[in-house]
Image: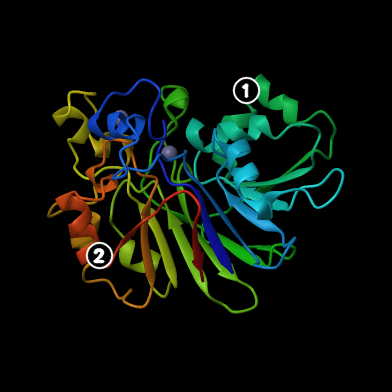
Amino acid sequence: MRVEVLGSGAGGGLPQWNCGCDNCTLVRAGDRRVAARTQDSIAIGGDAAGAAQLLVNASPDVLRHIERSRRLWPRGPRDTPIGAIALTNGDLDHVIGLLSLRESQPLRILATRRVRDGLVERNAVLRTLARTPDQVTWTELELGREVVLDDVGVGVTPLPVAGKLPVHLVGLLDPSSEDNVALRVRDLASGRTVVVATALGSLDGIDALVAGADAILLDGTFWRDDELIALGLGRARAQDMAHVPVGGAAGSIARLAQAKIAGARRVFTHINNTNPILRADSPERAEVERAGWEIAFDGMEIAV
Ligand SMILES: [Zn+2]
Ligand SMILES: [Zn+2]
């Protein structure tokens, strides 16, 4: 099983079009300490040429991701190796790319009932993916139950993690445990697993979530809880956006120092453009690496 981080940025990417923070400014200046990043998406699948792939989330940058990754190119005149797309929540930076995958291509989308209903029942634009009855096949992700994708060669198990409603549904729906999930993806042949948890509102239950994983792709959105406030860029805390900070006594590095994951590749991704771990020479980056964690970049490949 091969994991490719297609987009390692959080919503907005790096640089973000309306952001002049230090990191975005350095990227625009061509500074080698910071690399540009597209918005969150991960491909998981076989290594062989033409092998079907599972896409985790459909980023606003999905078309760039497909063109950059040879494994996602069509194998014939009308084709895609994307065997399924699993949605971890209904945030626009994770679903809006679906609207770029029209062209009457049959798609299989895995989502909890809540995430599907939030997209389809309340959004006439999504009907563009239903031009024919067999264009999109929705497969319900039930918490704790594995969906087997024989063509991709993986099983996908959604696990509930603390999250929030997508911003555009707040006030329309009550929150549910199906709003946001982590995914445990198991290679059917080898049994090896990767855990993808890029929106993590709390570290409660994290030990069980990552136990036995061979690779972990974790929420690297913010370094500090008050990151946007301290930079004068917003009023929301990381926890208001359902993201646990990476640093600090209550952050994920400290919390996971005790977890039994020594043999696993540990990678932070979905990194917001304000996060100081993006700068190669920052003390925060050094702290992450000292703790045995890696920082995802666009195009990063992980053999699992
Ligand atoms: Zn996101
Ligand atoms: Zn910025």
What's the amino acid at mark 1? Asn
Residue 10 vs 44, above or below: the answer is above
Residue highlighted by disc 2: 256
Task: Pick the quarter of the image with the N terminus.
Answer: bottom right
Residue highlighted by disc 1: 123
Mark 1 beta carbon near ligand 1 (under 8 Å): no
Instruction: Return the x and y of residue 200 as percentages of the image width and height.
Output: 35, 48
Q: Residues within 10 Å of mark 2 (few under 14, many from 20)?
A: some
Q: How many marks?
A: 2
**Image quarter of residue 145:** bottom right
What's the amino acid at mark 2? Leu
Q: Nearer the viewer, residue 4 or 123?
A: 4
Instruction: Return the x and y of residue 223 as percentages of the image width and height.
Output: 22, 45
Q: Residues within 10 Å of mark 1 (few under 14, many from 20)?
A: few
Kindly state the secondary structure of the residue where label 2 is placed.
Answer: helix
- Rounded to the nearest whole Å, what is the CA distance between mark 1 and mark 2? 39 Å
Q: Nearer the viewer, mark 1 or mark 2?
A: 2
Q: Nearer the viewer, residue 193 or 301?
A: 301
Q: Identify which residue is drawn at 45% across, 31% down.
A: 166
Q: Nearer the viewer, residue 134 or 53?
A: 53
**Image quarter of residue 32:** top left
Instruction: Return the x and y of residue 270 as percentages of the image width and height.
Output: 39, 45
Specify which label sits upstream in the sequence, 1 or 2: 1
Q: Identify which residue is drawn at 84% across, 40% down.
A: 134
